[in-house]
Image: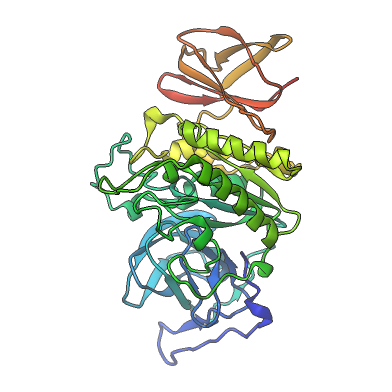
């Protein structure tokens, strides 16, 4: 969320060290120039705090350099963006310091973003230090569209930079190789030109998390109301920010154990479905009239089946605000512990952006997420799908390469039935039929790369 600072617009606090060439200007966090995105504890407006992954701070500034005064109760990694490009990754610990964000810039106006890329701690922001005579200003208008993402490690982007081929070999510091900025949910939000909040934590579930017995309170029902992940107070003020769409991606950890000594029984499907339906009512109680998209990784079929039951029960109860949007990634190119890599996140982000657009009727401009579009392995629009007749199509790689492995067709119009279609394609140009109607995107592989088609209407 972009915090309003509760209506207080306190002037920038400046201090200049006289008589030195290195005189600087300090800018306090309560300056109205700052935009706060995510759940921030603003009870002390000179020390705003955040803990949810994806929380970030934006501001425009003049001059050639900028530093941020920060501290954390644990090691937190930040993406530092200047003029929309990630210029460096830095970490914050329990020792307060002035973190150099950028130097040697042209002496003009720039935009700074401090982005919480990983989990693990509470970040406290205490202001900026600029060149002598430099100023700050609003970084521009806030997107009118709003999305809240509720999820687990798939939404966080857990270890998406690790490249461990699915292995859980912890040769990396997980927080260091987790980049939420490049995970699928922020990519989808940027492609939709939407402001977003993430309420996501690795390992959590609807009725249990993957590490603890079913008596644990580390579940969505408990954590959802919190401003900070691991603090029972303060509670989040749901009246301060209302999304147009809530995307819920929960369930994998309810049917997975990360702890071999866990004595609890996994896979209580009846309780899961009942709790899921109750949670959807909680969302409706917080945000009247909101639309809800249930996103499910199809690589977890048991979870997908349970979530389909949720949708069926909601529809039977007369609910028309719930949409089912499963997603698939190429599990052969996993990162760490069977999680998508940043390459797969880019593909999922594009598919989910189309799902969101179909549900919300927003219209996505050609200026989609540049991080997703420019990745060399993304294969965007590199798959040619042409209609032969009716629902029969030909499929071939744009560069003429042979197709290999399974081909997936994703329904992206938010309908409440399973949209995934899979057919093995071993080589060359093939003819096949889509068994579903709607808007679909097709994915395949060629020469070791993931290929993706343009959205295709099938009616």
Residue at screen point 46% across, 42% down: 268
Q: Position of residue 200 (x, y in %)?
A: 49, 55
Q: Position of residue 451 (x, y in %)?
A: 51, 24
Q: Is residue 356 visible?
A: yes
Image quadrant occupied by the N terminus: bottom right
Residue at screen point 47% across, 56% down: 219
Q: Is residue 109 visible?
A: no
Decide: is 48 above or below 289.
Answer: below
Does 249 sit left or right of 338 as displayed? right
Viewer-proximal residue among 436 and 313? 313
Viewer-proximal residue among 119 and 453? 119
Decide: is 110 above or below 319.
Answer: below
Q: Position of residue 329 (x, y in %)?
A: 47, 32
Does 427 sit left or right of 136 as displayed? left
Does 37 sit left or right of 402 as displayed? right
**Total marks in image:** 0
Image quadrant occupied by the C terminus: top right
Residue at screen point 54% across, 37% down: 306
Does 92 sit left or right of 260 as displayed? right
Viewer-proximal residue among 380 and 53? 53
């Amino acid at each position: 969320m972009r915090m309003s600072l509760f209506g207080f617009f306190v002037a920038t606090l400046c201090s200049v060290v006289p008589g030195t060439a290195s005189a600087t200007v300090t800018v306090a966090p309560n300056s109205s120039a700052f935009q706060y995105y995510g759940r921030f504890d603003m009870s002390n407006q000179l020390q705003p705090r955040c803990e949810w992954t994806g929380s970030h701070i934006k501001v425009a500034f003049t001059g050639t350099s900028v530093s941020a005064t920060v501290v954390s109760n644990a090691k937190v990694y930040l993406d530092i963006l200047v003029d929309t490009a990630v210029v460096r990754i830095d970490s914050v610990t329990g020792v307060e310091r002035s973190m150099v964000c950028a130097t040697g810039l042209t002496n003009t106006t720039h935009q700074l973003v401090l982005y919480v890329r990983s989990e693990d701690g509470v970040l406290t922001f205490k202001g900026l230090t600029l060149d002598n005579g430099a100023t700050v200003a609003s970084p521009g208008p806030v997107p009118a569209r709003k999305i809240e993402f509720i999820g687990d490690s798939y939404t966080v982007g857990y270890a998406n930079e690790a490249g461990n081929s699915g292995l859980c070999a912890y040769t990396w510091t997980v927080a260091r190789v987790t980049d939420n900025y490049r995970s699928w949910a922020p990519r989808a939000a940027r492609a939709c030109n939407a402001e977003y909040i993430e309420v996501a934590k690795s390992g959590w579930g609807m009725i249990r998390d993957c590490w603890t017995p079913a008596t644990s309170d580390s579940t969505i029902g408990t954590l959802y109301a919190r401003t900070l992940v691991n603090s029972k107070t303060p509670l989040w003020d749901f009246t301060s920010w209302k999304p147009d769409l809530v995307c819920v991606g929960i369930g994998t950890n309810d049917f997975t154990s990360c702890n071999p000594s866990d004595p609890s029984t996994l896979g209580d499907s009846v309780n899961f479905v009942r709790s899921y339906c109750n949670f959807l009512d909680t969302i409706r109680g917080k945000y009247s009239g909101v639309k809800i998209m249930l996103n499910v990784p199809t690589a977890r079929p048991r979870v997908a089946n349970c979530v389909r039951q949720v949708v069926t029960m909601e529809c039977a109860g007369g609910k028309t605000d719930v949409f089912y949007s499963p997603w698939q990634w190429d599990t052969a190119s996993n990162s760490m512990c069977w999680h998508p890599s940043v390459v797969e996140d880019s593909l999922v982000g594009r598919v989910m952006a189309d799902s969101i657009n179909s549900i919300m009727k927003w219209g996505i401009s050609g200026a989609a997420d540049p991080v997703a579009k420019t990745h060399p392995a993304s294969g965007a629009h590199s798959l040619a799908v042409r209609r032969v007749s009716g629902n029969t199509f030909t499929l071939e790689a744009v560069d003429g390469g042979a197709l290999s492995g399974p081909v997936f067709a994703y329904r992206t119009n938010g309908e409440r039935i399973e949209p995934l279609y899979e057919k093995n394609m071993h080589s060359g140009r093939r003819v096949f039929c889509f068994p579903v109607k709607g808007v679909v995107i097709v994915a395949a592989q060629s020469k070791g790369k993931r290929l993706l088609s343009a959205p295709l209407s099938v009616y």
